[in-house]
Amino acid sequence: MAAPKMLKLPEVLEEIEMSRAAFYRMRARGQAPKLIKLPNGQLRCRRSDLDAWWEHCEQNAA
């Protein structure tokens, strides 16, 4: 079984075309994609979580 694709925060920010500051504001409001904090303090986002977040955004925009 393959491990799920994990994106680094800069990769997520590039894909959603958002600044780090704007992303953290959105995260504070509970509106950002789900992130996982690694033991070394770095943040990762599962590809599936980011795709689900995109789907949620599309549904709310309709």
Image: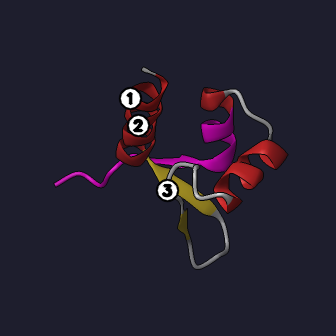
Kindly identify which residue carries mark 3: 34
Residue 56 has which mark?
2
For residue 37, which quarter of the picture? bottom right
Q: CA distance from mark 3 to mark 2?
A: 12 Å
On whether residue 3 falls in the magenta region, the answer is yes
Relative image position of residue 18 (x, y in whole percent) = 73, 33
Badge 1 or badge 3: first in the primary sequence: 3
At 62% across and 30% down in the image, what residue appears?
16
* Mark 3–mark 2 CB contact (< 8 Å): no
Q: Could you say whether the residue bearing mark 3 is in a helix, strand or loop? A: loop
| Left or right for 34, reference 23 | left
Type of residue at label 1? Gln
At 52% across and 49% down in the image, what residue appears?
33
At 43% across and 25% down in the image, what residue appears?
58
On whether residue 24 falls in the magenta region, the answer is no
Relative to the observer, which residue lies in front, 12 or 24? 24
Kindly identify which residue carries mark 1: 59
Q: Could you say whether the residue bearing mark 2 is in a helix, strand or loop? A: helix
